[in-house]
Amino acid sequence: MLKRIVISLFLLIFGFVLSYFNFNELYSKSSFLIAFILCGYSVVFAGLKSLANIFKGRFSKIFDENVLMSIACFGAFALGEWAEAAAIMVFYMIGEYFNDLAITRSKDAIKELVALRPRTALLLKGGICQEVLASEVKIGDEIELRAGMRVALDSEVISGKAFVDTSTITGESLPREVKTGDILLAGFVLKDGTLRVKASACESQSALARISKLIEHASANKSPHERFISRFAHVYTPVVVILAGLIAFILPFIFAGGFEVWANRALIFLVISCPCALVISVPLAFFAGIGAASKAGILIRSSAVLSTLARSKSFIFDKTGTLTKGVFSLNSICSELSDKDFIAHAAHATSSSNHPVAKSLGAAHAKMQPDCKLCGKYECNELSGLGVRATSSSDELLAGNAKLMKDCSISDFEYSCEHEGSIIHLALNGRYKGHALLGDELKSGAKEMIEGLKNAGINTLMLTGDNEIAAKAVAKELGIDRFYAGLLPEQKLELLERELGGGVVAFVGDGINDAAALARADVGIAINAQDVAASAADVVIINSDIRALSKAFDIAKRSRGIAWENITFALGSKIVIMVLGAVGLAGIWAAVFADVGVSLLCVLNAIRAGRK
């Protein structure tokens, strides 16, 4: 396309020079005609295809910008305006080239991100290190990582300590230290040292693979703005063709000027009316926004989601793992059992749970009794929103919140506590044995993120299954407007349903027990790429950095704002120049600006949405 544009532009200028110095008219017209053919043949063929829809009964697909451009150019030839016909097509293709260039750059940035996924990995088997295809590595296989290597699959560090560069996935420029137990995502780069890791996902389910799938379908659902443009174009195009026909064939009988004058004005009117700026630039604004978000480690499923996120009026947050780190420390134990026995029972009961409290109990047990492994003699049943029931041939353990103790009618259970923190209660064979108080820390940047949302006029609400004392302390420290504590997952969903209808509602969760709420909200945002519940979310922040939520909201607002700017500017300028053209106050060059110039300005404006 670029070669055709350069040659056509040269021929167009050459034709103007020949005309200016009054050389043989045949040479200048030949120059204009060749320039038109080089740039315009694809537009003319596309226009003929659209017109062929008449014979297929697809009347809504007959008129598009290609038909309008073709009619205008051939009309200009018929009127003897060969230079104008060639100029219209050359400048139109220049605008198309810049549009394609902008889209290609957005796509290339995303492809570069996906292409970072290594195709091989160093598999460890029997102490021997062997290079194999990443697709051959199974979950649980051990892999060796060396300095400078890129992580091939999502994995967990099982030995070693090193710094990793996470910028390609999370957008974070500073290297992050990782050690045993930490999670690595495919695409991270090992800066120093050597790590032994265990694959936690196969290649097709890695973070980069999920990015690829999400971006592949990112434009599947159009935004309300794009749907508006599609509906608008189906009505707008035939209307302007009819109006052009009235200008050419009716107005000569009403006003002075003759057929040739009004036919020329009708053609100018058609060129001005081409909806290229709208059709091109509005989707580009959203696509550029999705690309910018993906480079910052924020995956947005579609332009419709991006538009909806920008219109959000309320943000509802889960607490544990979302606003707080979800890494609990043991503060105190109050029990008739010894601390070791209490933690041993609680850790055994919750050993099969992935809840942050359960993991903290397991870590406390390992610290107190490093030589005593969790034996797995209990059959564990997780009770969503309550806790865990674990049974063996001789014992039954209950570990969870106060509601679990009450629902199971545990004898001797009378508890009230004014301490801030999460409480885990323990019952053995129907008798209450005491409780442990666990502390959780706020995530870095959570307070600033909430302040930013509130400054933007967003209402904030927190829902948690934790006790009211702990919830109140977090809500107060962060400045959250309202909170509800002691909730089961179904109660969270009920409260979310209650909030819907009062404006667009976004729900933010870490993927643990939040899948239903993530799916039901107007916008579901998962602050965790590892949890399968993230598949229910519309937006996935692939690390646990809550600050990325503010960036996602800013990108959404910027993209939507730019889309509206383009709609307003394109329609406003076209309407003004169309009226001027219809009454003879705007010539063919004003028409070229209204079509190509406006399109180019809108495309350049849309590219701004791609800034990180």
Image: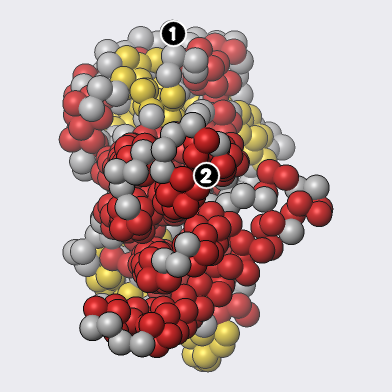
Where does residue 374 sit, x and y in percent of width and height? 52, 50
Give the residue at x 41% y 43%.
Answer: 257
Give the residue at x 33% y 81%.
Answer: 15
Q: Quadrant of residue 315?
A: top left
Q: Work out which residue is located at the far right of the displayed protein and give it.
A: 56
Q: Quadrant of residue 162?
A: bottom left
Q: Quadrant of residue 556?
A: top left
| Image quadrant in which the C terminus is located | bottom left
Where does residue 133 sit, x and y in percent of width and height? 57, 85
Where does residue 511 sit, x and y in percent of width and height? 49, 40
Q: Which badge, 2 or 1, comes first in the chain's sequence? A: 2
Q: Are marks 2 and 1 in contact (CB under 8 Å)?
A: no
| Image quadrant in which the N terminus is located | bottom left
Q: For mark 2, what is the residue?
A: 248
**Can residue 28 be seen in this snapshot?**
yes
Q: Secondary structure at mark 2?
A: helix
Residue type at numbered disc 2:
Ala
Give the residue at x 23% y 27%.
Answer: 456
Q: For mark 1, what is the residue?
A: 414
**Can residue 530 be seen in this snapshot?**
no
Give the residue at x 36% y 87%.
Answer: 24
